[in-house]
Image (tube, rainbow, N blue to C red):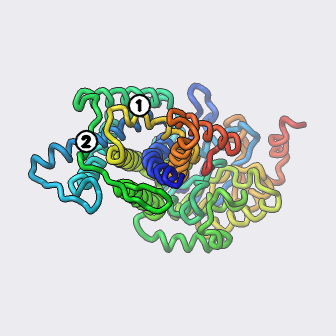
Amino acid sequence: MIELLVYGLVLGSIIALGAIGLTLLYGILRFAHFAHGDLMTLGAYVALFLHSDLLPTLGIPEAKLGALSFGWRLLASLVLAMGVTAVVALALDRLLYARLRERRASPVILAMASLGVAFMLRSLIYIVWGPQFLFYSQELRPAWELPLEVRLRPDQVFILAVVLLLALLLYLFLQRTTLGKAMRATADNPQLAWVCGIDIARVTRWTWLLGAALTAAAGVLYGIDAQLRPDMGWSFLLPLFAAVILGGIGSPVGALLGGMILGIVQQVSTEYLAPTYKPAVAFLLLILLLLLRPRGLFGG
Amino acid sequence: MPLLDVDDVSAGYGEMGVLHHVSLQVREREAVTLLGPNGAGKSTLLKTIFGLLTPSTGRIMFQGREIAGLKPPQLVRRGLSYVPQVENVFPSLTVQENLEMGAFTRQDGVAERLEEVFDLFPALRRKAKQRVGGLSGGERQMVAMGRALMLDPALLLLDEPSAGLAPRLVGLVFETIAAINRAGVALLMVEQNAREALRISQRGYVLASGQVRLEGPGERLLQDEELGRLYLGGRR
């Protein structure tokens, strides 16, 4: 039971990372970004390319990191993949979404366009990397035997630490910097933000950068915990949206908590139900919560 | 030369004209009230001055320069500020953060200006770290006005600052507006509360069906019979 709780926390933290970006995008650009899950996949595969192909070719060795199943090279690949995915997201915005916004396309059109981007990204990944499961590391992943029959892999501790660090950095950015405050202001009231002279284009760019970087990190972390599959991000899309809605649309703190709750509930349910029912349990929880709090946990 | 010179301006939404050849002036440091029945075009005039609508005829001069066609981000840099009637604050931000957003385009002197605005609204200083969403209607209106004052504007456009407030707060809001004006900021405000608004204004205009029907010193408009007729028009 406690073990499931911990596993749920790990799964939840990965969902949370993707959901934070999704909720920021929704709050500021006002559309449901359906390609968010596939950006997550892209981040994971970019990191794989860096870790297994590019960096070794450049002669960068893998130096193991303590008890983890991987080393510094994957850590560097994680950071670089966040950057690459952010740039891809910026390019997509410039080439596609920005043009639709200029034509005053409705949120539904933007959402449908992002669905197209989702299919495109996924197909691209199938073409380049193939449909099989891939791994960052072939190392064995021994688990620590902790009290109360908890088995915990060092990798999982790493995942939790990275998510907490990124969430903390994002929180500080949003609370302490002028740009972060401007992002929150724009999410609150875009018209008033514009009237204040806030540079909406700059806020939009930073929203894409942060949202894409965070979801790429989520993809890499999921790859470390499980494996890489071309449809991994797509299968995360519903939990991501559920976490956003659970936490209250537009609230990064809400998305973080929403993701954690979803992850934990899904894992703990496997104690009583077949794992196939995991998503159903998550949505049952979502329905119940929305009946009680229609605007989500942190909805305004 | 007036601070703001609206000359023969027509504007509206799409094909629908709302304003028809409106002319109006605001001088330096002057408080001017814009009155008129619902649908007269008062808010439309403020929005047109602030670049949210583009006039189809006429000129709008501010500090001697044409501003028709400029957008709000450019206008705030020139010393024009606007407080919308509704949704005029960032509810999930704190009081202080709201004020800081008002100074977004300002490079330096934000901390000093923040102190000056807190001096104008002492009640806000005590609640600086509270989220605006949890404040009362009167306090939110103070935040909205404080936000608009952060760039030290020459002219403040106020759209119905007393709308929706509890009667006991209305007086406080007008006192604050009078204090802003005494501090040297010119005002153009749309109001339904004709008596209170004219009392703190030097001049007033009465708009009906998108045209200026009356203009003059506040005292004279208060006594004018036609004002009552225009106002009570539909209700008699």
| Residue located at (73% from left, 47% from top) | B35
- How many tags in the picture? 2
| Residue located at (52% from left, 56% from top) | B1
Q: Chain of mark 2?
A: A
Where residue A27 sits in the image (x, y, percent)?
51, 44
Residue identifier under label 1: A114
Depth check, mark 2 against mark 1: the one in front is 2
Q: Regarding mark 2 in the picture, which secondary structure is present there?
A: helix
Q: Quadrant of residue A143?
A: bottom left
Q: Quadrant of residue B9?
A: top right
- Is any part of residue A168 visible from this angle? yes
Q: Regarding mark 1 in the picture, which secondary structure is present there?
A: helix
Nearer the N terminus, badge 2 or badge 1? 2
Quadrant housing the C terminus of chain B: top right
| Residue located at (51% from left, 63% from top) | B100
Residues at circles 2 and 1 in contact by the CB criterion of under 8 Å: no
Q: Which mark is residue A230?
A: none
Q: Chain of mark 1?
A: A
Q: Which mark is residue A46?
A: 2
Q: Quadrant of residue B131?
A: bottom right
